[in-house]
Image (spheres, grey):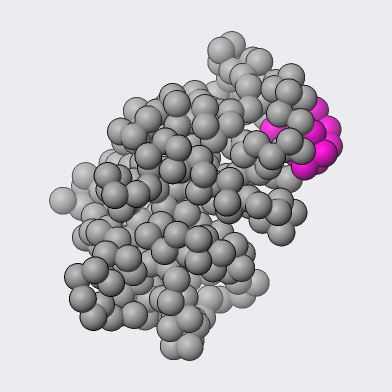
Amino acid sequence: MRCGSIFICEIQAPLLNPNKILNVAHRGASGYAPEHTLISYELGEDLHGDYIEIDLQMTKDGVLIAMHDEKVDRTTNGTGYVKDMTLAEIKQLDAGSWFNEAYPEQAKAEYVGLKVPTLEEVFQEFGRGARYYIETKAPEVYPGMEEELLRVLTKYKMIGQNAPSSKVLVQSFSQESLLKMHALNPKVPLVQLLSYSGPATITDEQIAEIKEYAIGVGPSFKRIDRAYVEKVRENDLLIHPYTVNTKEDMERLLDWGVTGMFTNYPDLLNEVLKGKK
């Protein structure tokens, strides 16, 4: 969507510089610490990640927490669905010990007993000096997720007149969730996550539709090629592939012209970016 005026430009195309490659710490620096814990997020910042990525689930009592899966089984010592548990029950869980068992070479005693953070706790810890790349996970499971996200963003002044437009990005595989976010507050920059079972292709019609509400797309890096990246970029959309964990893949994607990427190793991407200057 081309801008007809400065005002419309501000709403439709927040000032994310396409020449600045975004280094997004995937679930924090999750190659080195238990994903979606405050330690992982802090490490992501220390290792030069530009954004803290936060996957959202919602507790039985309506609190947004940082967790990738709908169930707590993989990343805690508990079992069951987040939607069936209260925040108090979630807070009883150990969200760090699993990492030490899965990755003994990265194990640290301080990871034992880490807690699942709420979105508000992440904002309280890192404040407005940090940038956040937030994903609404399984929004169809959590009625009111988008409204609650906007409430929390507003409470901590992450969006609105005095917040930089690139302070927060919201992404989702759910187009319905992003359209709802856009209808509730068109100033929040959105990114459409895309899943492909084979080689990625994108039509002019799909691009036009996405540009009605989003500023970029997020496909798996394994499914795209140079032509895909070039087509997205020629249409003034940002492209942030996931999840890129080797120097070779990072260098190839940068050569193709991506505007950022998700990685479990933000220090590695920082090294590659430094080498490109």
Q: In the figure, 99 relative to 244: above or below?
A: above
Image location of residue 123, percent across then percent down: 45, 32
> Can I make out residue 95 in this image?
yes
Q: Which residue lies furthest to the left in this view?
A: 277
- Residue pictured at 21% horizontal, 44% vertical: 274
Q: In the figure, 112 relative to 186: above or below?
A: above
Is 114 left, or right, of 154 in this rendering?
A: right
Image location of residue 157, percent across then percent down: 37, 39
> Can I make out residue 71 in this image?
no
Image location of residue 131, percent across then percent down: 36, 41
- Residue pictured at 63% horizontal, 22% vertical: 115
- Residue pictured at 42% horizontal, 64% vertical: 186
* Residue nearest the observer in this picture, 146 or 222: 146
Image location of residue 62, percent across then percent down: 69, 39
- Residue pictured at 70% horizontal, 54% vertical: 143
Is 176 left, or right, of 153 in this rendering?
A: right
